[in-house]
Image: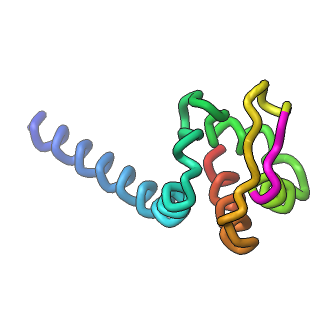
Amino acid sequence: MKSKSYAAFMLAGTLAFTGTARAQAPGLALAQKQNCMSCHSVTRQFMGPPLHDVAARYAARGDAVAYLTRKIMEGSAGVWGPVPMPANTQVTQDEAMSLASWILTLK
């Protein structure tokens, strides 16, 4: 009986994780393609702040998507510490908006 309960619990956990991973896959794939993950992690401090922390800081802003889109494209300095984020000239406006929207789902 215990093994059936454990198997059901593990299956439910796996399906929940897979659903979450699948929902985040396009945003994460774009972030990896555009080299965002060279300086950022979703949950850990790296060269730049964790994307989870970025989402938490800006989620309440009414213009959060537009604000982060601009920061992604133009870069930023001094907001999260001494390491500046360079402008991402290879990212299109639509890609930056998609990245900003995805980041805000990570809160």
Q: Main secondary structure of the magenta part?
A: loop
Residue 89 falls inside the magenta stretch:
no
Residue at figure coordinates x 71%, y 44% from the top left: 55
The mark tally for this picture is: 0
Segment colored magenta: 73-77
User: Quarter holding the N terminus?
Assistant: top left
Q: Residue furthest right?
A: 62
In the image, taking residue 16 as reference, residue 79 lies left or right, namely right
- Where residue 36 appears, x then y in whole percent? 58, 50
Q: Position of residue 9 (x, y in %)?
A: 26, 43
- The structure residue drawn at horizontal position 70% and vertical position 57%, both measured from the top left corner, is 88
Residue sitting at 72 percent across and 62 percent down? 89
In the rendered image, residue 76 lying in the magenta stretch gets the answer yes
Name the residue nearer the viewer: 69 or 23. Answer: 69
| Spot occupied by residue 53 in the image (x, y as percentages of width and height) | 68, 36
In the rendered image, the vertical position of residue 41 relative to residue 45, given as above or below: below
The one of 85 and 64 positioned closer to us in this rendering: 85
